[in-house]
Image (tube, grey):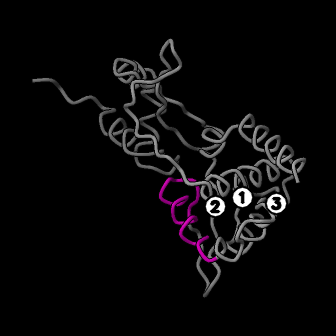
Amino acid sequence: MNEKKPYSKAIVFLLKKTVENNSPVWNDIITYQKDIQNYLSDIGLELVIKKDEGFAYLKQFALDDDNTLSLVQRRQLSFEVSILLIVLRQVLEDFDNNPTDTHSIDKIISNNEIKDEIRLFLPETYNKVKYENELERHIKTAVELGFLKEVKRNNNEVRYRIHRIIKEKVTLDDLDMFKRKLEEYAGTI
């Protein structure tokens, strides 16, 4: 019978979701990083550790044709959730480039601030009232995907921490592409 490895629990956590530095397996991930990577590479996964940002996650190796083995589930996101994630990514980028609170590396944003940011990106013809009514559902999706973490709730206002994993999933190239498409769209009006 095979002996249980000291990093087995860490691998299980990583296979389920992003692991943060306050997780009970964080030290195992750091200590056994090489062993974990060796194990995961056999099944086409790469361990990514962002120590300075406080999290680790798994990424699929790209094959020669830029496809993957499809071990990690990919979800098709709606237009509305995609806009939300792009906006959250831009808010985090702005925060990182101009931090207002030098004591915090976390960007905290309320559901009302998210609503205000979203309004700037929706086309004029888009039904903004309908979108704002559905925004809570889209925010819940972002929470389920791990991009937002609820930190405080007060009556109708909820405050969230934008998880830094969003920087890995929505890249600066994605932001640039989105801005170009917005400019193209604006040029057609």
| Residue positioned most to the bottom | 155
- Left-right relation of 175 to 70: right
Under tag 3, what secondary structure? loop
Residue 71 percent coordinates (x, y): 37, 31
Residue at image point 40% right, 19% down: 41
- Image quadrant of residue 152? bottom right
- The residue nearer to you, when weighing 135 against 160, is 135
Residue 159 sits inside the magenta stretch: no
Magenta-colored segment: predominant secondary structure: helix
**Crowd tier of the residue under label 3, counting other residues whose Cα lies within 10 Å: few below 14, some 14–19, many 20 or above:** few
Q: Nearer the viewer, mark 3 or mark 2?
A: 2
Distance (Cα) linking label 1 and label 2: 6 Å
| Residue positioned most to the left | 1
Residue 88 percent coordinates (x, y): 70, 55
Residue that mark 1 sits on: 107
Q: Closer to the N terminus: mark 3 or mark 2?
A: 3
- Left-right relation of 21 to 14: right
Residue that mark 2 sits on: 161
Residue 133 percent coordinates (x, y): 62, 77
At label 1, which amino acid type do we have? Answer: Lys
| Residue positioned most to the top | 64
Relative vertical location of residue 52 with respect to residue 35 in this rendering, above or below = below
Identify the mark at residue 101; answer none if there is no mark.
3
Under tag 2, what secondary structure? strand
Q: Which residues are magenta?
A: 133-149
**Crowd tier of the residue under label 2, counting other residues whose Cα lies within 10 Å: few below 14, some 14–19, many 20 or above:** some
